[in-house]
Every structure is written in C-alpha cells, then in structure tokens.
Image: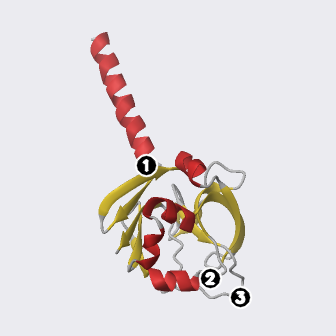
Amino acid sequence: ILELLMKLLLTFSLVFLSFSTFAQSLLLRQDNAKKQYVTKSDFKNIEGIKSLKVQNVWRKYNKTYEGVEFYKLLDKVYGKSWRNAKSISFKALDGYTQTTTIPLMLKMSTGKTGLIATNEEGQSGFSKFVRNNKEVALGPFYLVWSNFSVDDKASHGDALKWPYQLKEINIDF
C-alpha cells in the first residue's frame, strides 16, 4: 500500500507541476494554430525584463510593471511580418477575447510602449482589484501601455487593448 501511495503522490506531483508550468505560459498562435509557448523565464532571453511606469486610465492609478516589451516579443516569435497581418486577439483565462486590427493598433501605439507584464515592480505578482464585488487577479500576464495621461479617455473600442489574465495571443495573417 505504501508503494501505491508513493506512486500516486509522484503522479499527482508531476501533473500538478506540469499544470502549474502550463498556467504560467503564454501561448502565441498564428491563424489559430499553435506557434509557441513562452514563459516568464523566456522573457529574460528575449530582451530581458524591463520596467515600465504606466497610467491606467480605466482604473485611475499609476503603477510600474515588469515584463517584456510587447512588440519585441512579437518580432522574436513572428518576425517583422506580423506588422503586416490583419488582426490580433487576446484571450484571457476565462475565455474572454479582445480583438483589434493590427494597422490601427500600430497607428494608435505611436509614442507608446506595450509591455507583457508578469508582475508589479517589487512584487511577485499583481495587486488584485474588485469587480462586481469580487477580487480579480490580473495574472499570469497583463498587457499594459505607457504614455497615457489622466486626461485620456478609455473605452472598450480602443485599439490598444489592456487584457489581463492573458493566456493566449493570436495573429491572423
């Protein structure tokens, strides 16, 4: 019985460990086909971890996040050709998906920097926020943008999306 319990414990540990790693991975797709998974540790090999101070016009706060520059990540995975693609979509852990056209996103991001954030500076993750009387976690990944001011207006129709709980990015060519 002890041997059986040890095998079950080892199996459970391996499954949990692989799920935990999977949950901390960002899936990059091309035309809805799997292209590549990247993890927080991969970010260090792409361009290194960067810090970026942002003004969140939705939630009315300034924060500094750490992660990898969004366009540099896309260049590394897709090459520069992604810039000529049609659209990009962002899927959250709960399945919610946001989509924008790439030409409009590139135009609207002039003078701004996008960051796939893995945490707030000085923390191992993100502060939670309250939505519909429930605490919401922003991780594992959160796309944020620099160079917004308190006077900027934000709407769901904006070309620069701020998806949180990000698990997947798809580019349609």
Q: CA distance from mark 3 to mark 1?
A: 36 Å
The residue lying toward the viewer, choosing from 99 and 80, is: 80
Q: Position of residue 52 (x, y in %)?
A: 69, 64
- Where is residue 92 drawn, in percent x and y? 42, 64
Q: From the image, which quarter does the N terminus lie in?
A: top left
Q: How is the image coloured?
A: secondary structure
Q: Can the viewer see residue 167?
A: no
Total numbered badges shown on the rendered structure: 3
Residue shown at 67% from the left, 73% from the top = 146
Residue type highlighted by circle 3: Asp
- Residue named by callout 1: 23
- Measure how far apart labels 3 and 2 are at the Cα level: 18 Å
Q: Residues within 10 Å of mark 3 (few under 14, many from 20)?
A: few
Please rate how many residues cluster around mark 1, counting C-alpha atoms within 10 Å: few if below 14, some from 14 to 19, many from 20: some
- Look at the numbered discs 3 and 2 and tell me whether their residues touch, using CB distance below 8 Å: no
Residue with the mark numbered 2? 110
- Position in image of residue 170 (x %, y %): 38, 67
Please report whichever mark, 2 or 1, sits nearer to the chain's N-terminal start. 1
Residue carrying label 3? 151
Asked which secondary structure carries label 2, the reply is loop
Q: Is residue 83 above or below residue 95?
A: below
Instruction: Tell me if 52 is positioned left or right of 24 in this view.
Output: right
Q: Nearer the viewer, mark 3 or mark 2?
A: 2
